[in-house]
Image: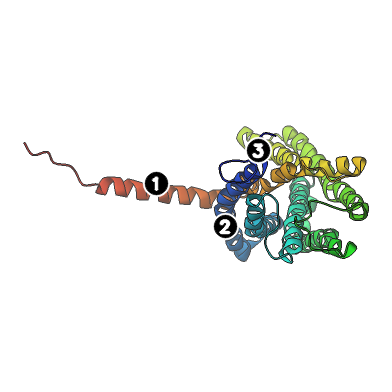
Amino acid sequence: MPDTRSPCGCEMLHCFLFAGYIVTFVLGVPLNVLALCTFCRKVSRKATPIDVLLLNLTVSDLIFLAFLPFKMKEAVDDMTWLLPFWLCPFTGFIFYVTIYNSTLLLTGVAVERYLGVAFPLRYSLCRRPRYAVWASAIFWLVSLTNLSIVYIMPSINNSSVPASCYLDFTPKELEVVLPVRLELFLVLFCVPFAICAFCYINFILILSRLPNISRRKRLRAMGLALGTLLVFAMCFGPYNVSHVVGFARRESERWRLVALLCSTFNACFDPIIFYFSSAAVRGVLKRCFQTVMAKLHILKCQKPAVHVVT
């Protein structure tokens, strides 16, 4: 049997997962911290509904990234859970709650943008930040409630502590897990994705008919809509499709690990959405870039000249 282990000591697939988690963590943390500071400042001065939604999305991503090192450790250990077992359900619960909470918050952003273009006058009269706060609270509650299955699972089969964390299931456990996963696919992926698709497609159609908007702004807004929809499908689609395949085959698919890795990349793509959705984020990034370039220029000017003595 060929050796599938890499020089780092883990299987190639697991090392691939570890590398993906590292990339997500290294890129996601600074970008989301920068976005968090920007939205906190923006909300404290003059909050808008989309700022509240994006702030919650940033907080969700940062919580997700804070627990990502546990998944790195699991991947290095060949998906064997060597940490205290109470961390397994806790980590899984937070991990999946933040993933599905992102789908709901991205849907909220899509609805807000669509209403602002489709009904500009009527929506401006009832456009209040507190509505976005209530919507965000509902999104968190829905995610927390639906993912409570992670804590219910250990009580289904009162056997010895398993070696892995929610990877291998008994037939009795699969009777509970598979229908719940199908429900997650329908409620927390299909419904949000359908709403996003409706909002952004109509958003693009409406913008294409508006004469009083510059071509540059129109193309940027259309690109943001299509890009957000594409990120939604690429990041959350594969993992949720695995729910349907597993339900049909009555087993937990092993390729779900790679599909889940696609969902983790969303923490890196969200700041790109922030950049195009918020002028405040664009302004902060522009100032940071100008500051860095100015400091590099100063260092270059201060570099001592080399005198050649002949």
Label ID, residue 33: 2
Q: Distance between the residues labelled 3 and 1?
A: 45 Å
Is 286 on the left-hand or right-hand side of 227?
left
Nearest to viewer (mark 2 / mark 3):
3
The residue lying at 63 percent from left, 52 percent from top is 72
Mark 2 or mark 1: name the one nearer the start of the chain: 2
Residue type (three-letter) at the residue carrying disc 2: Val
Numbered disc 2: secondary structure? helix
Numbered disc 1: secondary structure? helix
- In the picture, the quarter occupied by the C terminus is top left
Q: Is residue 58 visible?
A: no
The quadrant holding residue 249 is top right
- Residue behind mark 3: 4
- Residue behind mark 1: 293
Numbered disc 3: secondary structure? loop
**Is 301 or 111 nearer to us in this picture?**
301
